[in-house]
Amino acid sequence: MLLIPKTMQAVVYRGANDLRLETVPVPRIGPGELLVRVAVCGVCPTDIKKIQYGTIPPPRIFGHETAGTIVRVGSRLQQFRVGERVALHHHVPCLECHACRHHAFAQCAQYKRTGITAGFEPAGGGYAEYVRVMPFVLPGVVRIPARNSFLEGALLEPVNTVLKGVKRLALLPGDTVLVAGQGPIGLMFTRLLALHGMRVLATDLLPARLKLARAFGAAAVYCPESKVQSPKPKVEGNPKPEARNPKSSITHHASRITHPAANPQLSALVHQLTKGRGLDAAVIAVPSDAVVREAQALIRGAGQVLLFAHTRRGAETSIDPATVCMDEKDLIGSYSSDYLLQKEVARLVFSRKLDAPRLITHQFPLAQTAAAIELASHPTAESLKVVVVQDE
Ligand SMILES: [Zn+2]
Ligand SMILES: [Zn+2]
């Protein structure tokens, strides 16, 4: 029998930018629920946004990229055992409603409910010692194999959101895809797209991140700030210098005329990589409207721009609607995870094909969760994925 205390430590959100380490009751579970002792919880940008801008009312306990050990099983549950190491999903769709029948799980009313809590209004609860797992998210409980760590388990949810984004793109092997922003999410896109046989052009303001993008399979990298390609992209064939090739000079000139929104160097690089065709798709993993417009200019006709980091409501931006109508350039979005990808994601992470733990650069104890969130929201040249760790 595991001895479970009556109270625990938790990091409670008390208002905008106000996180406090408090002693709260260990959640009580119902007959159809689980109690999990949290081992690792990843720091996710969507939580950071809620905490910093105070967009939802306090008090709450955040943290939703959670892995841990089952310490209590509700009397009605047969399929779980105390001691099992698990990764959790705080959102699970019903699979039956109108949205679910259209495979729009993130729009399902059940999916929008948070099914994991450490107390107060459910908000994930991962920044606490114990969480209660409610019946409707039990299908989202994934067992962690003995050879894998809690750190790997905590990466299932973010990797799932990225794989869902990749599946939104209509790509053929060998296609060229821009991934703008090489933070933890952008790097996962780079890796997953490369694993799917795409040629990735990775951009970021931090050269250290571009180096990792290379290691994760990017075919070319570009740093907009330094105005230098770093390092020089490898391109198949050897395009002749434009000055000596009037034909290519004309094409290039033409491409510049149709790409007024794009940085000329990036534009030239895309031209070179795609033999003048344009990008097949672009993934925007930075919340910048200028980058969206640039990507819109750089994709080919009937290409796709996927928004992945635009999570602040109320912003307005201008896009020429004719590029969508006549050029058939799709502007699409992807948010949150896809329940049906759980098995594929577990295989990718647990087989270590994805090498996701390499993205974890900083681990903080529970008491320093506020510092973890501060670092994740103001990344340094070296910092990528930040996690709160209670047990490895
Ligand atoms: Zn997340
Ligand atoms: Zn549904």
Image: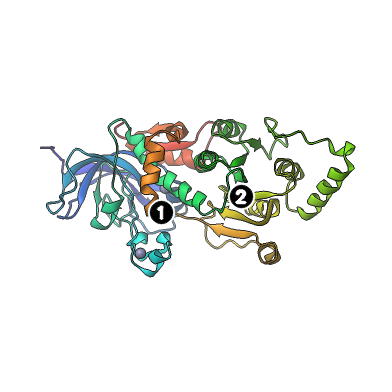
At x 31% / y 46%, what residue is drawn? 88
Residue 21: image quadrant is top left
Would residue 337 be found to the left or right of residue 251 on screen? left
For the C terminus, the image quarter is: top left
386 or 270, which lies in front? 270
Q: What is the number of callouts on the image?
A: 2
Mark 1 Cβ inside 8 Å of ligand 2: no
99 in relation to 130, above or below = below
Q: Quadrant of ligand 2?
A: bottom left
240 in relation to 112, above or below = above
Residue, disc 2: 282
Residue 331: image quadrant is bottom right
Q: Classify mark 1: helix, strand or loop.
A: loop
Q: Classify mark 2: helix, strand or loop.
A: strand
Residue 212: image quadrant is top right
Q: Is residue 366 visible?
A: yes
Identify the amino acid type marked 2: Ala
For the N terminus, the image quarter is: top left
Residue, disc 1: 338
Identify the amino acid type marked 1: Asp
Mark 1 to mark 2: distance in Å? 20 Å
x and y, in percent, of residue 86 in the image: 28, 41
Would residue 236 be found to the left or right of residue 163 on screen? right
6 or 328, which lies in front? 328
